[in-house]
Image (tube, rainbow, N blue to C red):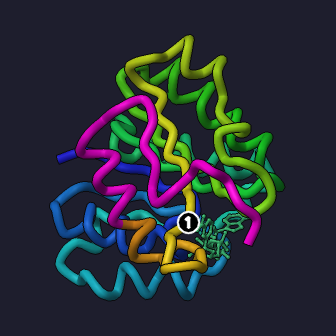
Amino acid sequence: MKHIFIAGGTGMLKGAAEHFIEQGHIVSLMARNSDRLEAIRAKYPKRKGKILTLSQDYRDTEKAMKSVIKAADMYSYIDLAVLWIHTSGVEFSEAVKEFLFKHHPKTKVYQLWGSATIHPKKLSQKEWREQYPEHYREIFLGYKQNGDSARWLTDREISEGTIRAVELDKPEFKIGIVDPWIVY
Ligand SMILES: NC(=O)c1ccc[n+]([C@@H]2O[C@H](COP(=O)([O-])OP(=O)(O)OC[C@H]3O[C@@H](n4cnc5c(N)ncnc54)[C@H](OP(=O)(O)O)[C@@H]3O)[C@@H](O)[C@H]2O)c1
């Protein structure tokens, strides 16, 4: 049983969060909307004590970090973190990695990069990859080709791809097509 922290776990990563809960892991979820967080907890009444909901805006780095530290203290360790953090939360995104790699050095961190405005690989964080080659992992979100047209990935594809990325545990993993990058 692992303790898995997911930032942004109530949206497109909800399927991945529920998969980890069903696998018997302890799952800490961070998002702002407490109803959506509680809906996940309510779905698994027998696992309630193993699902920690952190209703927190990650744009407030100090408070968001207090929540991460609380979650870590509660279960003594965070084994795996999945980070889907918008650019508005970049400060938190860096702070949580610094904290985990310093205090929980065995933690694997999976960071998702979206492709809406820029080629997702341009977002790649070389510094973290070089410093923690066994522990920092990146997931790049691409698109799906349907004949002549391209479409956005579905939540299900993103969640299933994230689960697969964790299973494979490679430094990088692409969901859908990333190259060539297109604006759609
Ligand atoms: N390449 C692709 O195909 C691609 C890439 C990215 C996204 N998408 C699609 O686009 C859709 C929308 O994307 P989305 O980014 O809105 O993702 P989302 O995963 O649906 O929602 C964002 C998640 O982060 C949380 N969140 C957002 N802002 C937060 C904040 N300030 N503090 C704490 N938590 C925060 C949200 O919960 P709260 O709102 O409750 O805080 C939610 O859990 C997705 O459903 C996905 O299918 C596709």
Q: Position of residue 179 (x, y in %)?
A: 58, 48
Q: From the image, which quarter does the C terminus lie in?
A: bottom right
- Residue beneath the point at 78% across and 51% down: 118
* Direction from residue 86 to residue 146 in the image, left or right: left
| Quarter of the image where one finds residue 106 | top left
Q: Amino acid at mark 1?
A: Tyr
Q: Is any part of residue 101 visible from this angle? A: yes
Q: Position of residue 35 (x, y in %)?
A: 56, 88
| Quarter of the image where one finds residue 123 | top right
- Residue beneath the point at 39% across and 39% down: 78
Q: Which residue is mark 1?
A: 143
Q: Position of residue 175 (x, y in %)?
A: 45, 56
- Ligand 1 contact, mark 1 (Cβ < 8 Å): yes
Q: Nearer the viewer, residue 150 or 70?
A: 150
* Direction from residue 105 to residue 90 in the image, left or right: right
Is residue 92 a member of the stretch shown in magenta?
Answer: no
- Residue beneath the point at 39% across and 76% down: 156
Is residue 179 a member of the stretch shown in magenta?
Answer: yes
Q: Which residues are magenta?
A: 160-184
